Image: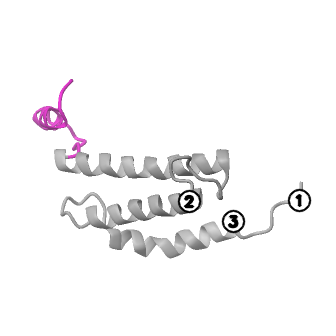
């Protein structure tokens, strides 16, 4: 299987109109994917076992705390990786968008549920 470097070079050599990610950008995106996956994993555990339950290996740490830690890991990783100079994304641009996202989500999540 070709490496991301070989894939990048092949697409570039063949005049691809879609410029693939560089090997470093690919590495950053893979790392973000892993961090996002850890957040998803904690959400799934909460859905199965509840916010207040805990992992058997760490009975004093509730799932809610584990989720908070994973979200912090994800956001911290985003902030750090946005500074690496690879132009994958800008945390400043993300933060500019946050108020509009909050307004949009607020209407959905803070409105009373529809009567069934």
Q: Which residues are magenta?
A: 1-21
Mark 3 surroundings: few (<14), some (14-19) or many (≥20) residues within 10 A = few
* Residue placed furthest toward the right: 116
Nearest the camera: 103 or 63?
A: 63
For marks 2 and 3, the one nearer the N-term is 2
The spot of residue 36 in percent (x, y) is 43, 51
Quadrant housing the N terminus: top left
Q: Which residue is mark 3?
A: 109
Q: Image point 23% across, 42% down: which residue?
A: 20
> Quick check: marks 2 and 3 in contact, CB under 8 Å?
no
Element under disc 2? loop
The spot of residue 63 in percent (x, y) is 58, 56
Tell me: 94 left or right of 99: left
* Residue placed furthest toward the top: 1
Q: Image point 51% across, 47% down: which residue?
A: 57
Nearest the camera: 95 or 80?
A: 80
Q: Which residue is mark 1?
A: 115
Nearest the camera: 70 or 86?
A: 70
């Amino acid at each position: 299987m070709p490496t991301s470097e070989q894939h990048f070079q092949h697409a570039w050599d063949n005049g691809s109109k879609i410029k693939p990610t560089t090997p470093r950008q690919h590495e950053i995106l893979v790392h973000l994917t892993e961090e996002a996956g850890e957040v998803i994993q904690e959400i799934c555990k909460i859905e199965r076992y509840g916010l207040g339950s805990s992992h058997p290996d760490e009975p004093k740490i509730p799932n809610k705390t584990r989720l908070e830690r994973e979200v912090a890991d994800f956001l911290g990783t985003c902030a750090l990786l946005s500074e690496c100079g690879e132009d994958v994304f800008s945390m400043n641009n993300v933060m500019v968008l946050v108020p509009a996202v909050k307004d949009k989500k607020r209407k959905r999540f803070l409105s009373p549920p529809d009567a069934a």
